[in-house]
Image: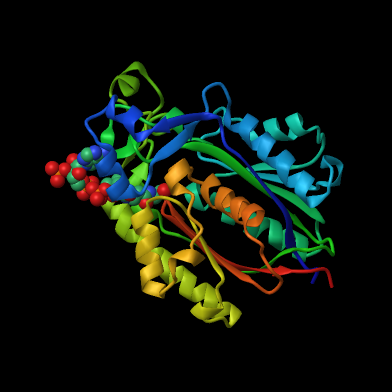
Amino acid sequence: MTSSKIIGTGSYLPEKVLTNSDLEGLVDTSNDWIVSRTGIEQRRIAENESTSEMGTKAAQCALEKAGLSIDDIDFIFVATCTPDYQALSTACIIQNALGAPHVPALDIQATCSGYLYGIFLANSLVKSGTFNNILVIASEKLSSITNYQDRSTCILFGDGAAACVVSSANQAGLKIRNLLLGANGKFATSGFVPAGGCKTPASIDTVNKGLHYIQMTGNEIFKLAVRKMEESCKKSLEACGLQVSDVNWLVPHQANLRIIEALAKRFGFPQDKLCITIRKYGNTSAASIGIALDELMRNKNIQPSQNLLLTSVGFGLTWASGVLTYQNPL
Ligand code: UT7
């Protein structure tokens, strides 16, 4: 089996900032409520940029960090639940924008767990020797499916993108020790966009009813998120033979600060081991773990043998957890 590592990460956040006080002018809410119930202070909004444009920028950062050019890439995965178009893979649009004709390109729709699903697939393809370098991108323009008249959802979501290169190259990087994936469609309607798919095609009626926006049962997803993240983190650590005390950094999906803190409490992780970006960016779905991971790699001095525990839960329900260990070249 070939060894597989993440050898470069990147991210991209659009410039426009939407603050809690901006939202106070749109819906019946308050900065105090939003901060105390979610931890979010602001989020970024892509005004004139699409999911593919943000994803392309994040991918270029990851390639530069990895010291590779697009010509070195064998496959492109794009995790998103906000594709540029229906019936057209956003991965193909990014492939063209990056200048990678003939490289296979595939969208992954696993909501907030999409980035880890993508890394799982890339890791398997690299380890099996099928490909050497795979670009995994997560990009979301959640503002395009957010109802800014619904206070229970519009406070949560933001736009952004992240990317990484999963590679067989013998260079410093994050070895993918394991990734465990899960899903349970029983909870499908806990969070979703009701219209625009084949079950309920878009119509004047669906638009008038706001069915093209995210709807969710927030507190149900909240409880499921804490439970599933805890379960899958435990399984992931066990599979690697690691204890909670071996984890140097927890990199969780950023859905709600209270979810992250509840998880940290259950494991006894101190605050300084938590990677938290939700205050600045809100919930960017598939991109959130990737953005947090990129910030960690850029801002902290990650040392060889340090372990990162990644975990996510998203609509579907989908979940994923895994351990990455920083390694120097052999
Ligand atoms: O990424 C995918 C996974 N997504 C998630 O994990 C989302 C998880 N869920 C959550 O983050 C939380 O459930 C929310 C932040 C969405 C809601 O927080 P909550 O503590 O579960 O509040 P709630 O829905 O139980 O509502 C409590 C009260 C309600 O008022 P009443 O019925 O008690 O009078 C709501 O109407 O808070 C009210 N409320 C608000 N008040 C001010 C709901 N949204 C707001 C708001 N501002 N924005």
Tell which of 237 and 31 is nearer to you: 31
Q: Is residue 49 above or below residue 151?
A: above
Q: Position of residue 46 (x, y in %)?
A: 52, 28
Q: Position of residue 323 (x, y in %)?
A: 59, 69
Colouring scheme applied when the structure was drawn: rainbow
Tell which of 107 and 60 is nearer to you: 60
Tell which of 131 and 60 is nearer to you: 60
**Residue 170, located in which quarter of the rendered image?**
bottom right
Q: In this view, does 234 lie above or below 49?
A: below
Residue appearing at x 37%, y 51% in the figure? 256
Going by the picture, which residue comes out furthest to the left? 28
Q: In which quarter of the image is the C terminus?
A: bottom right
Q: Please state if 238 lies on the left or on the right of 255 as rendered.
A: right
Q: Where is residue 52 in the image (x, y as percent from the top left)?
A: 63, 32
Q: How many marks?
A: 0
Residue appearing at x 51%, y 58% in the figure? 275
**Residue 103, located in which quarter of the rendered image?**
top right
User: Can residue 262 be seen here?
Assistant: yes
